[in-house]
Every structure is written in C-alpha cells, then in structure tokens.
Image: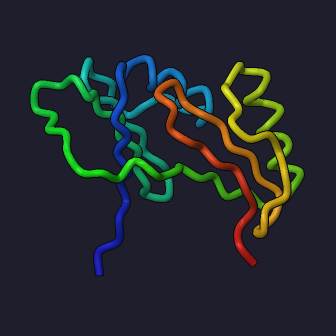
C-alpha cells in the first residue's frame, strides 16, 4: 500500500521559506524556484513549499489544522532544539512543556505553520 511521503505547505515566499527551513534542517533545499521549493530527507520524506500566489495554485478545502513534527529520542534533544531555534530567532508559540505524550514545544514558520518537537509516543 502506498504511504504518504510528501507534505506541502502553502507559503507567501518559497525562497524565503526555504532559507528558514534550511536553517532548521541544517541542509540545503533540493530545489528552489520563485513559486516552489523542496526538501528531501535520507528517509524518503519530502517537504514542498508552494506559493499560494502561483499561477497554477488553486485554493480550496478547509484543512488548515496541521503540524510538522520532529520526533527526537529524548527530552535533552527537545530542549537542545528549543535552545537552538530560539537562538536563531524562530517564533515560539508554545515553550517547552509536558503534554500527555511527554516534553514538547511548538515553533512557527514565517507563514504561521506549526512545527512541533517531541519524543515518540510510548
């Protein structure tokens, strides 16, 4: 059965968003165009940053309640990413706190997309 391996985020300025995510991912994008940018991971996961102003963009749907999440091995890594991203000037929506699944925090990208960092369930 095919599994999703691409997440698309609709952004105002794909090259600017690519610079933001390049700093978070610590790797350059695979492609950057005026209306689209893309990242690839070694695990086969892809992130696309698509301009909501692109000529071929069609708006619709109602699903704007999603997050990108980074699962890290332990609380130390959660706190280390929080400190690193905070030092980079990344907007923090929720500082580190304990949720039902463990220590977590939520950052925001330049377009307001939520980026959660937490440990795996279980």
With respect to residue 64, does 118 lie above or below? Answer: below
Q: Give the residue furthest to the bottom.
A: 1
With respect to residue 88, does 6 lie above or below? Answer: below
Nearer the observer, 7 or 67: 67
**In the displayed structure, does residue 7 sit left or right of residue 58?**
right
Q: Give the residue furthest to the right.
A: 76
Q: Quadrant of the N terminus?
A: bottom left
**In the displayed structure, does residue 89 sit left or right of residue 29?**
right
Q: How is the image coloured?
A: rainbow
Q: Give the residue furthest to the front.
A: 62
Residue appearing at x 75%, y 62% in the figure: 119
Which corner quadrant of the image does residue 14 belong to?
top left
Give residue 50's position: percent from left, percent from top: 29, 33
Give residue 92's position: percent from left, percent from top: 71, 32
Give residue 116's position: percent from left, percent from top: 64, 48
Which corner quadrant of the image does residue 17 belong to?
top left
Q: Quadrant of the C terminus?
A: bottom right
Give residue 20's position: percent from left, percent from top: 54, 24
Nearer the observer, 6 or 121: 121
Nearer the observer, 36 or 98: 98
Residue appearing at x 83%, y 32% in the figure: 83
Which corner quadrant of the image does residue 10 belong to?
top left
- Count numbered badges in the picture: 0
Residue appearing at x 77%, y 27% in the figure: 86
**In the displayed structure, does residue 107 sit left or right of residue 83?**
left
């Amino acid at each position: 059965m095919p599994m999703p391996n691409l997440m698309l985020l609709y952004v105002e300025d794909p090259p600017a968003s690519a610079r933001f995510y390049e700093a978070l991912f610590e790797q350059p994008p695979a492609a950057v165009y005026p209306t689209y940018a893309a990242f690839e991971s070694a695990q086969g996961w892809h992130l696309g940053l698509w301009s909501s102003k692109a000529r071929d963009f069609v708006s619709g749907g109602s699903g704007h309640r999603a997050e990108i999440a980074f699962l890290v091995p332990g609380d130390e890594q959660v706190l280390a990413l929080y400190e690193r991203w905070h030092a980079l000037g990344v907007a923090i929506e929720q500082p580190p706190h304990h949720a039902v699944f463990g220590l977590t925090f939520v950052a925001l990208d330049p377009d307001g997309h939520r980026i959660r960092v937490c440990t795996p369930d279980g």
